[in-house]
Image (spheres, rainbow, N blue to C red):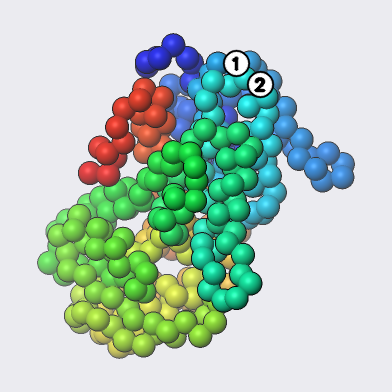
Amino acid sequence: MIAHGKNIKVFAANASHDLAKQIADSLGLPLGNSIVGTFSDGEIAVSINESVRGSDVFVVQSTCTPVNNNLMELLIMIDAFKRASAGRITAVIPYYSYARQDRKSKPRDPISAKLVADLITTAGADRVLTMDLHAPQIQGFFNIPVDHLLGVPILAPFFAKKFANDKENIVVVSPDLGSVTRARSFAQRLEAPLAIVDKRRQKANDSEVMNIIGNVKGKTVILVDDMIDTAGTLCNAAKALINMGKANEVYACATHGVFSGPAIERINNSVIKELVMLDTITLSDEKKNPKITVLTSASVFAEAIERIYEDLPMSSLFI
């Protein structure tokens, strides 16, 4: 496993401890010995309890809720590794927050996704490994290499197996125009047709379905998205597919389960039969639900880490 004379170490902050442990197990490594807590005034306290001098360090942390705390944990851990003379530091960010603030949509808007990229770079990261950025062009906000993994190669085989005996009745649906590329890739893997829900967004976290492009009548449809936040778009699309499109059943999948606000209640009350997510964001106990199935992304991250460590190409992960 050692390709260039340095040892590899995987560390976790608090948001992704379980996923980091699975990644380390997949690599046959112990999880790095570190403690991330807070001082009495709320400041982040980080202790790295083993030497990382000259090591290839991978620090795993999703910047999910509480977003700013988790982001600061990541930045402070990177700084600690840099000052401890780590050979190379890779920030493994399964879920990258602020990704929806990637441009100025009105005057005087910040571009927070670029600010976060600058913070990670300034903290001392040499490389970033992430999955399903909301806007793929965010890779260009960094002046360091970014490896951008996709959730589709994990999610699509699940549904391919589930509907192996009913392929001809499957239609893959994009819940909005922004997710068409992802849904098309998903549909190609399932050798299924593609449909699109055309919507008009009235305001943030609120949308109205306008039209369905494609035939879903009598079909089992699979809605494909990158993240589910308040679940308004997803549940409205699912309702329209049944009521307007006359679909038979609705399933859904996404990489990131943010599940803020009324998301779980909306999913409970929706026509969606099953929602399949990845574990890029750890579900709290109150968000766990019989309708929600969670698949692990650990093996994909582990292979990506091994390829980064051994200076091998990443292209095989996208096949």
Q: Tag 2 or tag 1, which sits nearer the N-term?
A: 1
Residue sitting at 54 percent across and 29 percent down?
A: 89
Q: Secondary structure at mark 2?
A: loop
Q: Amino acid at mark 2?
A: Ala
The answer, for residue 248, to whether it is visible in the render is: no
Tag on residue 265? none
| Position of residue 224 measured from the top left corner of the image (x, y, whole percent) | 34, 64
In this view, the residue in front, 195 or 288, is: 195
Dot 1 corresponds to which residue?
A: 53
Q: Are marks 1 and 2 in contact (CB under 8 Å)?
A: yes
The answer, for residue 87, to whether it is visible in the render is: yes
| Position of residue 22 measured from the top left corner of the image (x, y, whole percent) | 47, 33
Displayed quadrant of residue 254: bottom left
Q: Secondary structure at mark 1?
A: loop
Dot 2 corresponds to which residue?
A: 84
Q: Is residue 87 above or below residue 160?
A: above
In this view, the residue in front, 112 or 18, is: 112
Q: Amino acid at mark 1?
A: Arg
Q: Is residue 208 above or below residue 102?
A: below
